[in-house]
Image (spheres, grey):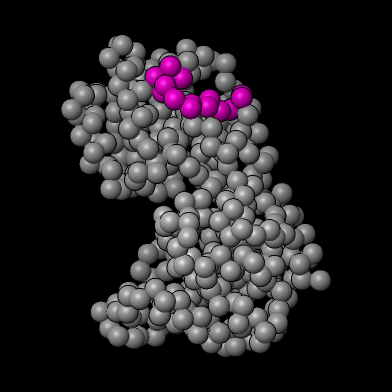
Amino acid sequence: MKKILHITNWYPNKWDDIEAIFIQEQFKLFSTVTDSSIINIQVRTSDKWMEYKHIKYSDNEEGYYLLTKIKSNKIIELITSFLLIFVLFKSNYKRYDLLHFHIAYPLLTYYHLWKKIIKIPLIISEHWSAYHFNFYMPKDTKKLDNIKRIFRQNIPLICVSKALVEDIEVFANATFRYYILPNVIDMDYFYLRQDYIKRDIPRFFAVNNWRDIKNPFEMLDGFLELHNSNIDFILVIGGYGELMDDIKSFVYTNNMSEKVIFYGKMDKLQIADELSQSDAYICSSYYETFSVVSAQALCCGNVLLSPPIDAILEYTDDKSHIKIAKDWSKKLQYFIEHRDNYSREYISQMASNYLSHKSIQNRYKDIVDEISR
């Protein structure tokens, strides 16, 4: 069994126990086919100039933190790199077959310098949508040069979708060896339940951190048209975020309160319970690198309604996915009129096959065997 040291800048911690929980789930699955440990390295904002903390979370999960009031990105990059080097030596990195970094920046900002000292195979896992948007900066911004350089160092990548690979290639103007491994879906929660009851009134569900990229208002306009046409539906909206008050205002202003149910921030069990009772899941985003909740919904047998986002098209087909480029009301009405044509059993089986833990485990084992030879 290969010995792997995972390193991440983003992970559940004492300040936020659900931060990047998808990385934790991926790590735990990878750990079933490798001898793995993970270290969370962070420079966190504090009211003190500098404070060091080491926290042991479990036998194979720990965190090294520097808390500081320094705000400069450049200085934080440097501090992160020094902390990383310290942790690598403290962890006796030479006893590992491979270093697996989850999210390249800022951990690998200065890899081009320290790779000459620490000679061990590396791989990077990437999930970020920031590459697609050029980190929301003009393309010629010099601040991005350090990030682009990471992907020009011939480090192989694991990405959650081919769409994300292409985003990073365009962003960095680089090519590299890559592997596609989808996000890990917790099949203990997200599966086809037998307690689903088909109701006369179709039930739709959407949950998010509601911000601009999630684009809720075109979708809401579609439901408003159904409402004004006296077409019955129930829309459940879960989550939180900067647009939530505006979403609620839209619903109340347009007298849709009887048809829209609001939940707040939802945990995994609550999302799974709602998916087991819903007919369709709504993903309204402009862009996704994968869309975990969409995949969870498919595993539960929900039809997916979303824009034709490339990353989502990698794990759906016409029997599971209604693509909405525009005119939400027509596609929503189409689903309502044809929902009997969609098989929850087929949708769940198709998604579960693509996202199966066994497949991901075997693929990861093959990847680390190949890279660490």
Q: Nearer the viewer, residue 72 or 305?
A: 72
| 324 drawn magenta | yes
Image point 30% across, 21% down: which residue?
224
Task: Kindly tell me whether residue 303 is visible in this rendering.
Answer: no
Is residue 255 shown above or below 92? above
Q: Position of residue 16 (x, y in %)?
A: 37, 64
The residue stretch that appears in magenta? 318-331
Q: Position of residue 232 (x, y in %)?
A: 34, 15
Task: Kindly tell me whether residue 114 is visible in this rendering.
Answer: yes
* Left or right of 327 on screen, residue 182: right
Q: Nearer the viewer, residue 136 or 38?
A: 136
Point out the image quarter for the C terminus. Answer: bottom right
Is residue 69 shown above or below 195? below
* Left or right of 229 on screen, residue 207: right
Point out the image quarter for the N terminus. Answer: bottom right
State which quadrant residue 91 falls in.
bottom right
Q: Nearer the viewer, residue 71 or 4?
A: 71
Q: Position of residue 222 (x, y in %)?
A: 36, 23
Image point 59% across, 53% down: which residue?
170
